[in-house]
Structures are given as C-alpha cells and as structure tokens.
C-alpha cells in the first residue's frame, strides 16, 4: 500500500530482517497480521505477547551516480535525530566520526514523547520551542515543524506509517529521503567521501563485509532488538526467551572481545557502532527499565572496556546524551513506568581508562 507514491520506493522483501527495522518510532500499520494501527512501539505485539518491530518505509538512496534523484551535495540534506534513540544515534555517530557534520546538519527532538497534534491523542517526537528550554533539543530550523509527524505528513499527505527517527531530509525536494538507519549509515560511510572530513575511515571495508553482515545479524536479533523484546514483552514466556537470547549474544561478544580489540578484528567497523549504541544504554536504562538484569555490562570485563574504547573514538562522546536517554525511556513508556520516575544512577564514566590497546601491540 505504500508503493504508489514516488516517496515510498519499493521495499525489497528479500533484504534481511535486521536491515528493515532500525528506527525508533511510533504509529505504524502492521504488515504481519490483519491491518491494525499501532499507536506506539508498545503496541507492536504478536498474539503471543512478543514484541515484533515492523519495517521502515522511506527507502530512497543518496548516490554519487550521475542522474541520481538524490545526488551528493553539501548542505542539501538534514538529519533529524533523537539522542535517546539508538538507531538515530548511530546515524549521528557516523556524521561525527566521518567528518560529515559540516556537510549535513542535524537537529535533535525533545527526549520525552508529547502530543504531536491537538486533534488526536498521538504521542511522539516533538521539537523544542526554543534552544534554551531543553538543552540538546532545538526547534526545527528547516521546515519549522512542531513534530517529526509533520515531516512525514509534509512528504506524503496520505502517509499512514509510524513517525520515526532518524529522518534524512532533502531540503531541495522537501521530502524524507530515508528513515532506515542501516541504510543511512551505509550512505554516510561511502557516498559522501568526496566531502567528508574523514573520508579515509571505512567502516564497511570490502574484505570484511561478509563478516560484518553476519555479525550485524545475530547482534541485532539478540542484543539491539533483543533488549526491546525483553522490555516490551507482555507475557512471561516471550520475555524469558528474549532474555536468554540476549545474554547468549552478550556472552558471545565477551568471548570474541577477549581475543581481539573489535568485533571483526583489529579495526573498528559498522558492527562496532551498531553494538555500541545498545551497550551505552545498557546499565543506565535496559537493566532496570527493560528487566535486563541478569548481568550488568560492568560485570563483563571485555565488553565494558570495549564500550569505553568506542566511546573514546574522536566524535563519539558528543553523540551520547545520557540525560536525554534516561528521560526518554523512563518518561515515555507509561505502561512500563507509569509515574515516570528516573533512577539517579549509576552515572558511569565511560571516559575513564580502558585496557583495549593491549590488542594493538
């Protein structure tokens, strides 16, 4: 149903599930069951009470190819993110560590969901009314929109999906280019190298692509989406299944990182950035809010030091706003945390020394 508009390019159903689902967001139609409206991610449930994330919709590609509808141009595109959202944060991480922040500007929404329109009860991502009211959140400088929802409705008057971040926006054509983070980071990695400040950094090198894809797959299923499957489960059995898969995957990461500095060897890759955005939220949010309390990240010596190592990559620390992260999770899921109480701790210092250089000797 989304394929008739040129703003809704054909979705390749053969793409692995882990590349279809990397957004933080809200309202969406279910493709798996009879058509029903999900008002938030909390509603994306199967009949068994398991959380089932559904696919992104805008799938256009910015390309250096001649004649591309979305060509590479400095200043043409804008990235809308939430610091709270791991999928959006990995796009911001690429923007920073690839040195693209001079070519592509970005805006972050407020951390806690609010009413997106006066005409209905939908709760979602909204922009700050001024840059001083919510540190880290700003008004929309491109379209003057009040919410992420407005951007989707500007792009398509008959849009009926969920209103997610990240949003990669084309200022010239005034439309969403892409809202699938796994595709946005690939574009940032390669297509913008002619204008990137750190073009030499290749997070998806050809000789490691097969290994990266395989690693992404099990980490997405077990960890990235696994924490959500734990936290949003509405029945005991799917929760227990998700927790088991989560800790099996974390144990596997710990074993790999006991032998090498990064997931795919001696160089940082896409797989590391994708894992990091979940790990950085783990002890601060997922342990408590999503009931992932079987073992803390700090109890995994290799994973914990690895997380500090990635955090200390130049540019990465600026993508982590723990205040936004905690405000969002604890303040936007009333069925999980009805009073919106935000825990005080643990306030981990990820800038402290780590031991990962031992693998570089």
Image (cartoon, helix red, strand yellow):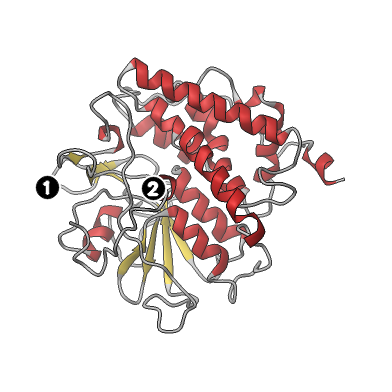
The residue at the point 25 percent across, 33 percent down is 43
Q: Quadrant of residue 115?
A: top left
Query: Number of labelled discs?
Result: 2
Residue 97, image x, y percentages:
62, 58
Give the position of the C terminus as an image quadrant.
top right
- Name the residue rendered at 50%, 76% in the picture: 74
Locate the N terminus by quadrant.
bottom left
- Residue 2, given in percent of the width and then of the height, sits at 21, 58
Circle on res. 23 = 2
- Image position of 333 with respect to 359: above or below: above
**Mark 1 and mark 2: span between their CA atoms?**
25 Å
Can residue 93 be seen here? yes
According to the image, label 1 marks what residue? 119
Viewed as shown, does residue 212 lie left or right of 35?
Answer: right
Image location of residue 17, percent across then percent down:
40, 45
Whichever of callouts 1 and 2 sits on the residue coming sooner in the sequence is 2
Q: Secondary structure at mark 2?
A: loop
- Frontmost residue, 175 versus 114: 175
Does dot 1 land on a helix, a strand or a loop? loop
């Amino acid at each position: 149903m989304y394929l008739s508009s040129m703003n809704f390019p054909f979705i390749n159903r053969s793409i692995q599930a882990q590349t279809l689902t990397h957004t933080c967001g809200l309202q969406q139609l279910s493709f798996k069951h009879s058509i029903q409206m999900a008002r938030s991610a909390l509603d994306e449930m199967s009949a068994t009470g398991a959380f089932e994330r559904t696919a992104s919709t805008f799938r256009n590609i910015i390309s250096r190819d001649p004649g591309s509808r979305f060509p590479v141009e400095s200043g043409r595109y804008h990235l809308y993110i939430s610091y709270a959202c791991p999928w959006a944060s990995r796009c911001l991480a690429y923007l920073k560590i690839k040195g693209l922040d001079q070519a592509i500007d970005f805006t972050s929404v407020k951390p806690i969901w609010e009413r997106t329109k006066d005409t209905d009860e939908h709760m979602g991502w909204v922009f700050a009314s001024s840059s001083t009211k919510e540190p880290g959140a700003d008004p929309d400088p491109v379209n003057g929109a009040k919410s992420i929802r407005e951007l989707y409705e500007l792009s398509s008057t008959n849009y009926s999906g969920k209103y997610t971040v990240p949003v990669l926006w084309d200022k010239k054509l005034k439309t969403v280019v892409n809202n699938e983070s796994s595709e946005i980071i690939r574009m940032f990695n390669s297509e913008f190298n002619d204008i990137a400040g750190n073009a030499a950094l290749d997070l998806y090198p050809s000789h490691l692509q097969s290994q990266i894809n395989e690693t992404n797959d099990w980490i997405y299923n077990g960890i990235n989406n696994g924490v959500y499957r734990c936290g949003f489960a509405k029945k005991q059995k799917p929760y227990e299944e998700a927790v088991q898969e989560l800790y099996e995957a974390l144990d596997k990461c710990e074993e790999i990182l006991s032998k090498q500095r990064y997931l795919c060897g001696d160089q940082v890759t896409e797989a590391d950035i994708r894992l990091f955005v979940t790990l950085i939220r783990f002890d601060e949010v997922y342990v408590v809010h999503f009931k992932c309390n079987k073992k803390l990240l700090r109890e995994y010596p290799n994973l914990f030091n690895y997380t500090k190592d990635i955090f200390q990559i130049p540019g990465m620390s600026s993508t982590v706003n723990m205040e936004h992260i905690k405000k969002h999770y604890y303040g936007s899921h009333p069925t999980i945390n009805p009073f919106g109480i935000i825990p005080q701790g643990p306030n981990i210092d990820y800038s402290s020394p780590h031991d990962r250089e031992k693998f570089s000797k």
